[in-house]
Amino acid sequence: MWRRVATAALALGAGAGAHAIATSEDPARTLKICRHLPPRLLRDSVAAAAIAFDYQYSLWGLQPDSPAWLTAKHDAHLRSANRLQELCFRNGGIYIKLGQHIAQLEYVLPQEYVQTMRESMLKRCPVSSYEDVRGVFKKEIGELPETVFAEFDPVPIASASLAQVHAATTHDGKKVAVKVQHDHLLDTSVIDIATVDLVVNALNYIFPTFDYRWLVDEIRESAPKELDFLCEAQNSERCLVNFRKLSPHIANSICTPKVYWNLSTSRILTMEYIDAKEVTDVKGIKDLGIRPVDVSNLVNKAFAEMIFKHGFVHCDPHAANMMIRPLPQDSKKWFGSKRPQLVLLDHGLYKELDHATRINYASLWKALLRADQNGIKEYSIKLGAGEDLHALFAGVLTMRPWERVIDPSFGHLVLDGNNTDRSEMQMYANLYFPQISELLRRLPNVILLMLKTNDCLRAVNHALVGGSTPESFEIIARASSEAVFEAKRMEKRFFLYRFIIWLEELLNELHLFGMKLWLHYQQPRRILAVAG
C-alpha cells in the first residue's frame, strides 16, 4: 500500500511541476516557484501516509462498531486531525484556507476534524515579519510604510491566511487599517494548489470513497480572486451599493470599511479603521449594550438579502470577518438595548448567482420552510442534486433528517445546537458518507459555496444564541418568498396571472403570520433558556 502512496506522490508531484514549467509564460520564474515543491510534497506525502497507516493499524482486528473499535477510531480521528492541522500551519497560505474550509464541513467530516480545525485555523494564522511587510511595500508602492504613512505600527493587529492587518495613520491624520499580503504568497499559491491537488488525488487513489476533488476545484477558482486586493475593494463597494439600492430597509445597519484607493494595490489594501467587536464575542457585544439575539437576526437578514435578492454573496462569513458595533448616531433602543450595525470584512471571496440559480435556490428554501416535498424535489433537481439525492441535499442544507424536513410544524427546521443535534448530524454524516461525497461532486461550485456560507452562518448563530433562532427562519421565509414572487411578477404581466400571484402572496402572508404567532409563543421559553 505504501508503495502506492509513494508512486502516487512522486508521479503527481513531478507531473504538476513539469506541467507548470512547460506551460508557463515565464519558465524561469516558474522554476523558481517550483523550488518550494519538494519540501511541501514531502510533508504532504508523509502526512497522508501517516494518516492512512494510523487508521489501518489502529482498527486492525477490531470488530466494527464495537466499543473498542469506536474508541480506537475516535483516537485515530484526533491524531489525524492534529497531523492535518500541523501540515496546514507548516505549509501556510492556501493550506490555511483549506483548514478553514474543513472547519465548516460538519455534515461531512468527523467531529474531531471539524473541532480541531475550528479551534485553531481562525486564531493561529501565520505572521509575516516587519521586514517582509516593508519588502511588499517596496515592491508595490516603491516606498516603505513609514514613509507612506505618518505612523505605521509594525506589530499587526490581526493576521489571516493570506494577509495581516496593521494600524496606521495617514499624513492628514486619519486612522486606517492596512492589509498587507504575506510575502511570496502569490508565488507559492501555484504550488500550494498543485500539492493540495496531489494530496486529494492520492487519498482518492488509495481510498476511492474519499473524493474531495471538488474542494480543489473550488480553491483553484477562488484563490486568484482572493489574492487580488483591488478585486476585494471593488467587491466591498459593490456590496454596500447593493444594500442601498436593493435593501434600503437595512442598509444603515450594514457597513463596509471605506477604501483608500490611492494607498491600495493588488497586494496592499488601505481601509478605514473601524473599532468594533468580533461577531461571536458575546460578552463584548453585551458590554456595548447590544443583545446577541439582535446580532443573530441582523446577520441572518443581511445574508438572506444578499443570497435571495442581490445575487452577489459574501462567501466567507466566518467570525473573524464580521464585526459588531452600535448603530452610529442612533438614539433608538429596543427594550433598553442598542441597535447593532454589522461591519463586513474580507471581501475577497464573493460569488455571483445568475437569475435562474438565485430564484431556484430561493424557491428551494421556500419549499423547505413549507415542508413542500414536491417543491423540494423539483428545485433540488434544478440545482444539480439529482432525483436520487434530493432528500440528502435537503438534509445537508438544513442539518435535519428527511423526517424533520417534511414535518409540517412551524419549528421543524429549528436547531437547538445541543449535543443531541450534533450527535444526530454526525450519525447521518457517517451513515451517508459516500452519498454525501457524490452529492458534493455533482453540485455546481456556486451551490457548494452557498453550503459553505450556510455552515459559517450556522456556526456564528450557534456562538451567539446556541443554535438557530425561530426568527432566523421567518427572515429566510420572507426574503426567499419575496424573491420568488418578484420573479413571477416580472415573467407574468397579464392581469389574471398578476391576480393569481397576489393570491399566492396573500396565502404566504398568512403562513408567515402563523409563523409569527408560533414565534410569539416560543419567545419567552427561548429567552429563559438563553438566560439560564
Image (tube, rainbow, N blue to C red):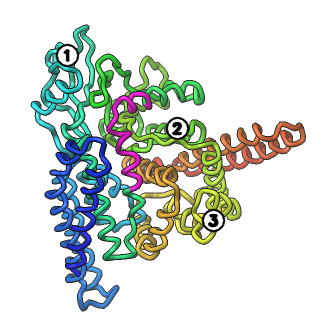
Residue count near mark 3 (Cα–Cα under 10 Å), binned few <14, some 14–19, many ≥20 = some
Location of residue 446 in the rendering, given as x and y in whole percent from the top left corner: 50, 50
Q: Count the marks: how many?
A: 3
Badge 2 marks a residue whose secondary structure is strand
**Amino acid, disc 1:** Val
Residue at image position (40%, 75%) is: 209
Left or right: residue 529 versus residue 227 is right
Which residue type does callout 2 highlight? Phe
Q: Contact (CB < 8 A) between labels 1 and 3?
A: no
Q: For the residue carrying disc 1, how many other residues have a C-alpha within 10 Å: few (<14), some (14-19), or many (20+)?
A: some
Q: Quadrant of residue 263?
A: top left
Q: Position of residue 191 (x, y in %)?
A: 25, 51
Q: Main secondary structure of the magenta part?
A: helix
Rendered-image quadrant of the N terminus: bottom left
Image location of residue 249, percent across then percent down: 58, 28
Viewer-side label of 1, 2: 1
| Residue indicated by mark 1 | 148
Which mark's residue is nearer the viewer, 1 or 3? 1
Measured as percent of width and height from the top left, residue 442 is found at 52, 63
Label 3 sits on a secondary structure element that is loop
User: Mark on residue 407?
Assistant: 3
Which amino acid type is shown beneath numbered disc 3? Asp
Q: Earlier in the sequence, mark 1 or mark 2?
A: 1
| 47 vs 242: above or below | below
Real-space CA distance between mark 1 and mark 3, rounded to the nearest whole angstrom: 61 Å
Q: Which residue is mark 2?
A: 312
Q: Is residue 2 visible?
A: yes
Judge by depth and name the residue closer to the eye, 285 or 521.
285
Q: Is residue 343 above or below residue 476?
A: above
138 to 494, vertically: above or below: above
**Among the 4 quarters of the image, the one containing residue 384:** bottom right
Tell me where the magenta segment starts and ends, as one range.
217-235
